[in-house]
Image (spheres, rainbow, N blue to C red):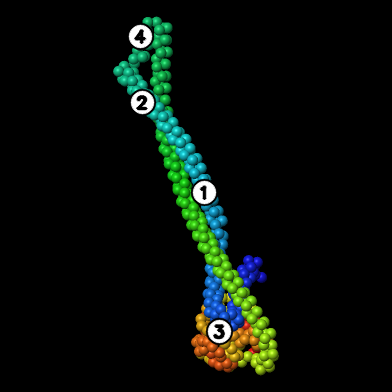
């Protein structure tokens, strides 16, 4: 089942085709009724403009449909582009947050590093001092050959003084032992602190590099997403502008078509009025004509009907429209004859109808009758009176045609009628 939009589009195209057809159908007989105002020139002018306008309307509608579809396709891509851009922006914000966290972590790591360096410096200074004390102690021992403090104790004047001096010697020995122990501990701590500082520096560098890489990647992704979104926005704007321009052109062409339709209606009114007057004045002659000229001669002897009168899908553009005549198929160059006596009121380029002849047959069977012969290869008779069966041209495929054939039409009071009822 076609969609509502497709149905509306098809209905609009069919309506336009009908308007164009109705405008054409009012022309042939109108020329006989307005001869005093040069109806032949009027008919040729209106008919030529109408054929051109019909082609323009079809081309414009095709362009509008293409522009509309391209715009819809682009607009359908916009949500995806916007989603990609939104995700890229979210990723960038996450990367920036991670970078900020990494910066904070780096700052803490650097603070810890500085603290560790300060502690290492203090340990190094303590080691230096401890080494000084050990060196001083070793020098004293060397100078005194290890007996200075003990000798001082032996030289005491009394036992109490000896005991005091021995206690002092013990304290000095304990202090020296403690100094050596702290020195060893400081050296071990210094080694551990150096390793810790190096580890902190490595962690800081890794965190900084990881954060920088994340920000760079997300910045690149966001730039790509923004570029894609901008390109789609620009394309959509251009397509909207183009669609609007085509729509405006279509409106203008429809307005011109309406103006031409009004002119066609005016001419049709004149035709109908004169036809009615002619009908009343020639009623008796019409009755006699009915008996003598009730049927038309086959306009292309030996041809076969390849397409009947009525609604059909056009074989070239695929649009449903009224096929306002019948198609007679035969080899190109086959002779075409007048179906009835009459006067040629138009012969020449008919736009989409190609080389075209229009004959006004006057009142036949009580109605105003005209016939048209379309897509001719060439025209033999360009004006004046012609007789039933007289060769007026040759079959071809000029105009909006996809093969050699004669498109034959019969108009009754300005309205297309199935030729089958007259042949």
Tag on residue 216? none
Q: Name the N-terminal-most of marks 4 and 3.
A: 4
Residue, x 51% and y 56% (percent of image)? 233
Q: In the visual, does 423 lie left or right of 110? A: right
Instruction: Tell me the distance, in whole angstroms, between the alpha carbons under discs 2 and 4.
Output: 35 Å
Residue 101 % position (x, y): 50, 40
| Nearer mark to the viewer, of 1 and 2 | 1
- Residue assigned mark 1: 89
Circle 3 residues within 10 Å: few <14, some 14–19, many ≥20: many
| Nearer mark to the viewer, of 4 and 3 | 3
Quarter location, residue 412? bottom right
Residue 335 % position (x, y): 53, 91
- Residue assigned mark 3: 345
Q: Secondary structure at mark 1?
A: helix
Instruction: Tell me the distance, in whole angstroms, between the alpha carbons under discs 3 and 1.
Output: 73 Å
Residue, x 57% and y 87% (percent of image)? 343
Residue, x 69% and y 90% (percent of image)? 284
Q: In the visual, does 297 lie left or right of 130? A: right
Q: Secondary structure at mark 3?
A: strand
């Amino acid at each position: 089942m076609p969609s509502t939009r497709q149905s509306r589009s098809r209905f609009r195209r069919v309506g336009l085709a009908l308007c164009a057809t109705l405008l054409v159908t009012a022309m042939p007989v109108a020329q006989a009724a307005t001869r005093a105002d040069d109806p032949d020139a009027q008919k040729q002018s209106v008919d030529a403009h109408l054929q051109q306008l019909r082609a323009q309307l079809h081309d414009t509608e095709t362009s509008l449909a293409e522009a509309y579809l391209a715009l819809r396709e682009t607009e359908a891509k916009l949500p995806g582009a916007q989603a990609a851009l939104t995700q890229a922006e979210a990723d960038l914000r996450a990367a920036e947050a991670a970078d900020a966290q990494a910066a904070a972590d780096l700052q803490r790591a650097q603070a810890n590093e500085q603290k560790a360096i300060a502690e290492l410096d203090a340990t190094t200074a303590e080691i230096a001092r401890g080494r000084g004390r050990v060196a001083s102690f070793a020098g004293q021992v060397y100078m005194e050959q290890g007996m200075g403090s003990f000798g001082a104790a032996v030289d005491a004047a009394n036992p109490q003084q000896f005991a005091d001096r021995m206690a002092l010697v013990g304290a000095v020995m304990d202090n020296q032992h403690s100094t050596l122990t702290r020195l060893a501990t400081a050296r071990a701590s210094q080694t551990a602190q150096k390793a810790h500082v190096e580890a902190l520096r490595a962690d800081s560098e890794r965190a900084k590099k990881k954060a920088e890489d994340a920000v760079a990647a997300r910045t690149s992704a966001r730039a790509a997403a923004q570029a894609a979104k901008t390109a789609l926005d620009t394309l959509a704007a251009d397509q909207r502008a183009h669609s609007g321009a085509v729509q405006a052109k279509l409106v203008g062409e429809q307005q011109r078509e309406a103006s031409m339709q009004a002119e066609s209606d005016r001419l049709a009114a004149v035709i109908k009025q004169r036809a009615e007057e002619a009908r009343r004045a020639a009623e008796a002659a019409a009755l006699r004509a009915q008996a003598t000229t009730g049927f038309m001669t086959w306009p292309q002897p030996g041809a076969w009907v390849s397409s009947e009168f009525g609604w059909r899908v056009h074989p070239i553009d695929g649009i449903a429209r009224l096929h306002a005549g019948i198609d007679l198929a035969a080899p190109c160059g086959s002779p075409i004859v007048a179906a009835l006596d009459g006067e040629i009121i138009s012969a020449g380029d008919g736009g989409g109808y190609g080389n075209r002849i229009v004959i006004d047959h006057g009142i036949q069977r009580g109605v105003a009758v005209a016939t048209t012969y379309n897509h001719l290869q060439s025209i033999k008779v360009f004006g004046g009176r012609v007789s039933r069966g007289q060769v007026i041209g040759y079959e071809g495929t000029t105009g909006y045609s996809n093969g050699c054939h004669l498109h034959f039409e019969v108009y009754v009071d300005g309205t297309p009628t199935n030729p089958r009822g007259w042949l």
